[in-house]
Image (cartoon, coloured by chain):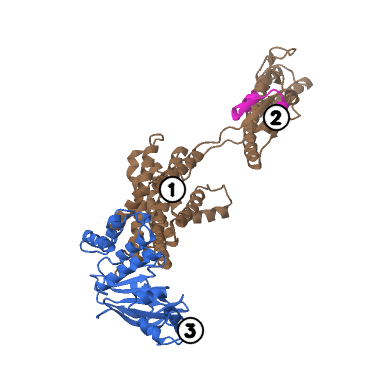
Chain colours: A brown, B blue
């Protein structure tokens, strides 16, 4: 078997373009996937037409809320392109310079001040269905956040008016009486007056007013709390029961390395076995008795060679990435274990593919067509698709090595759940299964 | 001449298809044995069983070196060269010599390079050689370890006349040196010219075993002394041994 291994190394050394492609291509794909996962979507470029007169405010009690603050909220959520007129904004949307335009009408403050009419914004879209869907989603989220911010400002103003009603003082509104008594102070003051009143109709009337003031004061205090609740009715408190404790960037590293490991290993192993058949050498090697190489030996040599090459590439990637993303080098022993088991499982999958293919190109295409969807399926998060579909995806992911490798590497690099031992056992079982399938495939193809 | 290979009651089924039925013959030292017959007659199946790439359903193939494990009884050169195009001529030979566990691979490679006349092309990559030279290397690899029998499956099918002539001279030289050569061919002219003996297969059955001259004599009137016409007439009459 060592002569076969030496031969394969010699052929690999002479196929520099193939080796370069085998390394560069998966690394490029892995980095793209990693970037896609780790980076949040960029802010959409949106034209903002603010038709409100400068400095226009909404009066709430004694406070004035600047309408421009609403626009500021919106600006922070998008890449704003300030545009003077609606017509210019439409042109920009049509030309594709911006993905959408938001027109803030001049009467927005007047409508808000009425307290009964909703203010309206105009949004202008363009582009294909996918782009429009993306922009609608991002802009909808941005508008919701801006609305929330603005409503918090109004709510704050309302709360301060209620405070003034309760505690008294100056309204700060032109024409309003100064040094007003607070509703909360009225009951005690009335009780003081009532104590000096003789029994009679006046005393009863005063006691009724004092009761009302007490009741109103208590309910206004409750109203303040209600206003806070309406402003942000649901607060989020996160509790992680199980699963990863992995920062997104280190998870992206794990995904990128797993993808590279898979591509290098599967393509090399599948191509290596298929090459023997393409060169018509397989029959010469396996004829007997005695056979020059046993079928098991041939498959083991191809799988092991691919696994070692992929292991080296993947470890180099991990080491290289650690210069940019902090990785815990004290766990390097676990990294090596996860990479080794993953590489062997991918090697077994590769030789199983190669055993069924008649030529290298067919084997490579088959390996690629099988590997890429498996990688994407393994990354589908639960809850993003229907439960039935997710169960199907989980089953498919379970019977191929990518998901198990991803989990093993995530556990090794980040200490994430499930445990490394379980994933390694899973990978060992998959290596055995695909090894047996490869042996059957080679026998059927003879 | 002593027997180099003994084929007895050989049969092979592929599901319902009986590709080979009860074929028996002996191949002798220094003999060139041609196997001819129409498409689907069972020539490649017979060669593959003799070479050890296919198992027989019934019967046996026995030879002096068979089963000893020390030396392969049958060398084999398949129809398409079974070699690595990214390795040189010498590297291909050395690899297979090592896999065959030849005692001194380097000396064996040097011997084969000299025997095939490919010494000057030893360092050329196989993919850069002409079809004829590739076939010579293919045959040379089949001869590594000096097997007493060499099985060749359509050895000259992809060669031009000059390359074919050189190959047959080489094969004749091997037989003269003591090797028993069994080859299959579609080219009945080659069977007549280079075969010491001819075996005719038809639908998996062996219908003739004898010299080319004996086949000519067995042919009905009207063959006009033409070997190909004689074979066609022989096949159309459905002769049985």
Task: Please state the horizontal and vertical placement of residue A81, each as a whole percent of the image.
Answer: 63, 26
Q: Mark 3 vs mark 2: same chain? A: no
Circle 3 sits in a helix, a strand or a loop, which is it? Answer: helix
**Contact, mark 3 vs mark 1 (Cβ under 8 Å):** no
Q: Left or right: where does residue B56 sit relative to residue A375?
A: left
Give the residue at the far front of this rendering.
Answer: B224
Circle 1 sits in a helix, a strand or a loop, which is it? Answer: helix
Q: Is residue A200 above or below residue B236?
A: above
> Which residue carries the number 1 mark?
A406
Rendering quarter of residue A296: bottom left
A77 falls in the magenta region? yes
Q: Which of the image's four quarters has the N terminus of chain A? A: bottom left
B214 falls in the magenta region? no
> Which residue carries the number 2 mark?
A91
Q: In which chain is the residue bearing label 1?
A: A
Rendering quarter of residue B179: bottom left
Task: Please state the horizontal and vertical placement of residue A208, each as a whole percent of the image.
Answer: 74, 25
Q: Mark 1 vs mark 2: same chain? A: yes
Task: Please state the horizontal and vertical placement of residue B188, each as a whole percent of the image.
Answer: 41, 75
Q: How many C-alpha atoms fall within 10 Å of the one at disc 3: few (<14), some, or many (≥20)?
A: few
Q: Along the polypeptide, which appears first: circle 1 or circle 2?
A: 2
> Which residue carries the number 3 mark?
B236
Circle 2 sits in a helix, a strand or a loop, which is it? Answer: helix
Task: Please state the horizontal and vertical placement of residue A60, each as a whole percent of the image.
Answer: 70, 22
* Nearest to the observer: residue B220 or residue A263: B220
Q: Which of the image's four quarters has the C terminus of chain A? A: bottom left
């Amino acid at each position: 078997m060592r002569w076969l291994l030496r031969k394969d190394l010699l052929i690999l050394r002479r196929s520099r373009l193939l080796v370069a492609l085998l390394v560069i291509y998966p690394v490029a794909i892995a980095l793209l996937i990693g970037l896609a996962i780790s980076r949040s979507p960029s802010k959409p470029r949106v034209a903002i037409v603010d038709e409100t007169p400068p400095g226009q405010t909404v009066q709430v009690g004694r406070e004035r809320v600047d309408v421009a603050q609403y626009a500021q909220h919106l600006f922070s959520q998008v890449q704003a392109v300030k545009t003077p007129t609606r017509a210019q904004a439409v042109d920009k949307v049509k030309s594709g310079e911006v993905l959408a335009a938001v027109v803030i009408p001049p009467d927005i403050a007047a409508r808000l001040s009425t307290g009964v009419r909703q203010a309206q914004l105009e949004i202008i879209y363009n582009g294909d269905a996918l782009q429009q869907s993306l922009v609608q989603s991002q802009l909808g989220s941005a508008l919701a956040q801006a609305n929330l911010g603005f409503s918090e400002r109004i709510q704050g103003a309302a709360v301060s008016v209620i405070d003034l009603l309760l505690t008294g003082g100056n309204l700060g509104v032109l024409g309003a009486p100064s040094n007003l008594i607070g509703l909360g102070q009225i009951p005690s003051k009335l009780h003081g007056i009532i104590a000096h009143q003789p029994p009679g109709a006046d005393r009863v009337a005063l006691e009724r007013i004092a009761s009302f003031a007490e009741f109103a004061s208590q309910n206004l205090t409750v109203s303040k709390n209600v206003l806070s609740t309406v402003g942000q009715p649901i607060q989020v408190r996160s509790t992680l029961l199980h699963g990863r404790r992995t920062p997104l960037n280190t998870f992206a590293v794990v995904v990128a390395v797993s993808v590279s490991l898979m591509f290098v290993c599967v393509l090399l192993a599948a191509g290596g076995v298929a090459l023997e058949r393409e060169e018509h050498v397989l029959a010469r090697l396996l004829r007997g008795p005695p056979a020059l190489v046993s079928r098991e030996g041939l498959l083991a040599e191809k799988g092991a060679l691919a696994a070692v090459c992929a292991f080296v590439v993947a470890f180099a990637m991990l080491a290289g990435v650690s210069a940019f993303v902090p990785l815990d080098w004290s766990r390097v022993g676990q990294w090596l274990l996860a990479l080794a088991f993953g590489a062997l499982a991918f090697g077994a999958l590769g030789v199983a593919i190669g055993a069924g293919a008649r030529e290298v190109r067919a084997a490579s295409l088959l390996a690629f067509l099988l590997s890429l969807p498996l990688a994407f399926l393994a990354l589908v998060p639960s809850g993003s698709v229907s439960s039935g579909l997710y169960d199907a995806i989980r089953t498919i992911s379970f019977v191929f090595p990518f998901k198990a490798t991803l989990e093993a590497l995530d556990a090794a690099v980040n200490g994430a759940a499930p445990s490394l031992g379980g994933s390694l056992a899973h990978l060992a079982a998959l290596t055995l299964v695909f090894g047996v399938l490869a042996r059957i495939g080679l026998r059927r193809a003879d | 001449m002593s027997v180099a290979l003994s084929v007895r009651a050989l049969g092979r089924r592929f599901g319902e298809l009986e590709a080979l039925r009860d074929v028996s013959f002996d191949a002798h030292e220094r003999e060139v044995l041609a196997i001819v017959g129409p498409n689907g007659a069972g020539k490649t199946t017979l060669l593959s069983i003799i070479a050890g790439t296919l198992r027989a359903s019934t019967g046996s193939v026995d030879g002096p070196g068979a089963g000893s494990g020390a030396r392969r009884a049958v060398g084999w050169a398949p129809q398409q060269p079974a070699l690595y195009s990214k390795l040189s001529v010498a590297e291909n030979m050395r690899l297979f010599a090592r896999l065959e566990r030849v005692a001194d691979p380097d000396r064996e490679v040097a011997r084969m390079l000299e025997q095939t006349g490919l010494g000057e092309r030893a360092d050329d990559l196989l993919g850069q050689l002409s079809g004829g030279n590739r076939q010579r290397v293919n045959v040379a690899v089949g001869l590594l370890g000096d097997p007493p029998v060499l099985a060749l499956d359509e050895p000259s099918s992809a060669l031009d006349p000059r390359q074919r002539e050189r190959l047959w001279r080489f094969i004749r030289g091997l037989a003269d040196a003591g090797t028993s050569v069994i080859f299959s061919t579609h080219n009945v002219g080659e069977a007549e010219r280079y075969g010491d003996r001819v075996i005719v297969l038809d639908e998996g059955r062996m219908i003739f075993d004898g010299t080319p001259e004996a086949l000519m004599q067995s042919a009905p009137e009207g063959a006009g002394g033409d070997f190909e016409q004689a074979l066609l007439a022989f096949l159309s009459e459905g002769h049985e041994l």
